[in-house]
Structures are given as C-alpha cells and as structure tokens.
Amino acid sequence: MFELSFIWAGIIAFAVLTYVILDGFDLGVGILFPFAEGEREKATMMNSIAPIWDGNETWLVMGGGGLFAVFPLAYAVIMPALYIPITIMLLALIFRGVAFEYRWRTERWKPVWDAAFFGGSIVAAFMQGISLGALVQGIEVADRAYAGGWWDWLSLFSVLTGLAVIVGYALLGATWIILKTEGSLQRQMQGYAWWLAAGTLGFVGFVSILTPFQDPIYFQRWFNLPGSIFSVLMPGAVLAAAWALFAGLNAGKDAQPFLAALCLFILCFIGIGISFYPNMVPPSLTIAEAAAPDESLWFALVGTLVLVPMILAYTAYTYWVFRGKVDPEEGYH
C-alpha cells in the first residue's frame, strides 16, 4: 500500500544522513584543530573547510524544518525530550561559526576564537551523539505528548554514544585533511586517523552490542527473520569498510580512507534505521502516526522535489570548484 508518510521518512532520513557525513568531517576538523603543530597548519585545516562548512549545515535546517512540517507530532515529542542537548548544540554551532570569521581579523584574540572553534566543534558533536543515544533508548510518550523528565536524555548509554560521535567525527576530519593536504600535516593526520579508526570501530562494536538491550523490540528486529539476515550482512559490510580504511591508510592513499570512513557512517546509519523502523520516535510512535495529513505532505513534497535537486546540484558544484589540495599560501583569509 502506498504511504506518503514513508516517502517523507526517507527524505528526512536522507537529509539527516547527508548532514552527518558532510558536517561530520568539518566538525571533525574542528575537534583536531588544537593538535595542529603550528599556525600555518591550523590555517590550512580551517581553509580546507571554509568554502563549504556553512553549506553543509543546510541539511540540518532541512532535516529539522522537514520534521516540523511533515511529522509535527514527532517534532512535538522529540523537542521537549531533547530540548537541552539540542539548544546546547545550536549554541555551539553559533560560536563555531563566529570563530570562522573573527580569528582572521585579530591577533590578540585569536587564541579565544581558536578555542571557540574547537569547543564549538566538540560540544556540537557530543550533543548530537547524546541526542542519538537518547532516541535509541526510547522516548516516553503518553496521550500523544512527551511524558518523561527534563534529564531523561542523560544516561551512561547516551554519554557513550556522544563520545562515539566525537571519535567518529574526528576520524572523518582526519581523513578529510589527508584528502585535502600534503606534507607534514597530511602525515600527522595519517597517524591520527589510524588510532581514530580503531577507536571508532571499538565504539561501533560496543554500542551495537548494547543497543538491543535498550528495548526488547530491538532484539526482535535484529534476531528474528528477516532482521537476522541484516545481523549477518551488516557486520560483514562494516568489516569490509574497515579493511578499506586501514588499507588506504597503510598504503598512503589520499581519497580511499575518507571514502571508507564515510561508508562506515552510512552503514551505522542504516543499522539505526533497521532498529527504528517502522517507528519515528522509538519505542511506540510510528511513522504513520506522527505524520501530518496527506494534503500537507503532498504540498510540502512538491516544493521539496524542486528544492532538493537544486541544493544537491549547488553542493556538488561547490565541492567541484574547491576540489584538489589546499594551498597553504592561499585560503579563506
């Protein structure tokens, strides 16, 4: 049976995934920023993402705005449940964005803006991970409204997922710098990326083991047919991506580590989708229940089918224009 709400769930999922893999690596660059060996390296790192970072965050706006427009009940439940981490994340992104502009315009206050860039990146990543962990744990719903407390989002599991996202984003950032730079900075990030890859895989394994214990329905989806098929296929796909990542790092490849790291994130996102489906807000609010009336979904879909290809085309064009290695002598400033 044709369900417009499931099409919209796919669109929202696509927007969130695109945000994670695009903004993930530039947040990762910010997380690694203090570990650069000097001002020249720091400037090169920032210049590698300066032309594209704000465009990457377009997908965050689309995901949040789309959720509000087409899944208003899900939005009304998720926002009270995650109000604190989402607010902190947005403030961190604001500080980080301001740091992009101001660090080039001062010498006296440059350390302050460098700290804002690093702090905004790591706090935003941590809050995104905590929000993900809180969703996986499940949000208490009663009478179509959030029924939990102010601090239900904070738990050992959500802190674990927050740390996992920090390490994963740092891996994306390191492999992005490998792709975009040469010389000593590239070699430094190759060394970091190896350990960050090992850490990311460790977190992925640990979180994957703990996730089925967050709700019995996760056990049913992963360990009963047809879900048990994914329980075999997904680890195999993750191992293949991990092999490509380490092989690329060991061989000194430029693009392979970054593409393999992106594959790891995509596979993890698919795993989350398998755990959630058909719920929009685990454990009890389904996609169909959370959706707006079909008239609203059709109206929003018409605009989306026009705008999304335009955004994709512009994004692709931007990355094409700024392809290649970053010249340390030129850049954003």
Image (cartoon, rainbow, N blue to C red):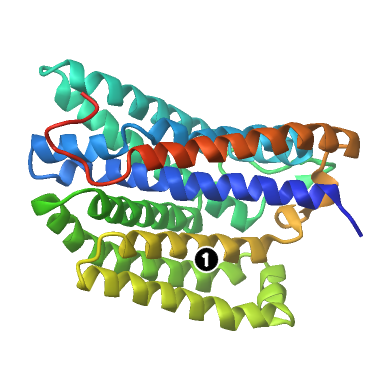
Residue 16 appears at what percent x and percent y? 57, 46
Q: Residues within 10 Å of mark 1 (few under 14, many from 20)?
A: some
- 68 sits left or right of 101 in the view: right
11 left or right of 125 in image? right
Left or right: residue 74 versus residue 252 is right
Image location (x, y in percent) of residue 123: 37, 39
Residue toward you, 78 or 229: 229
Name the spot of residue 120 as percent of width and height, x first.
34, 34
**What residue sits right under mark 1 in the picture?**
267
Q: Which image quadrant: the N terminus?
A: bottom right
| Residue 250 position (above or below residue 276) | below
Residue at position x 39%, y 42% in the image? 320
Amino acid at dot 1: Leu
Query: What residue do we see at 44% from left, 70% from top?
Result: 206
Q: Going 16% across and 19% down the picture, which residue do you hit?
A: 109
How far across and down, in percent of the image, does residue 63 sit? 61, 39
Q: Nearer the viewer, residue 282 or 260?
A: 260
Q: Is residue 56 left or right of residue 173?
A: right
Q: Which residue is at a point 59% across and 44% down the rendered structure image?
A: 15
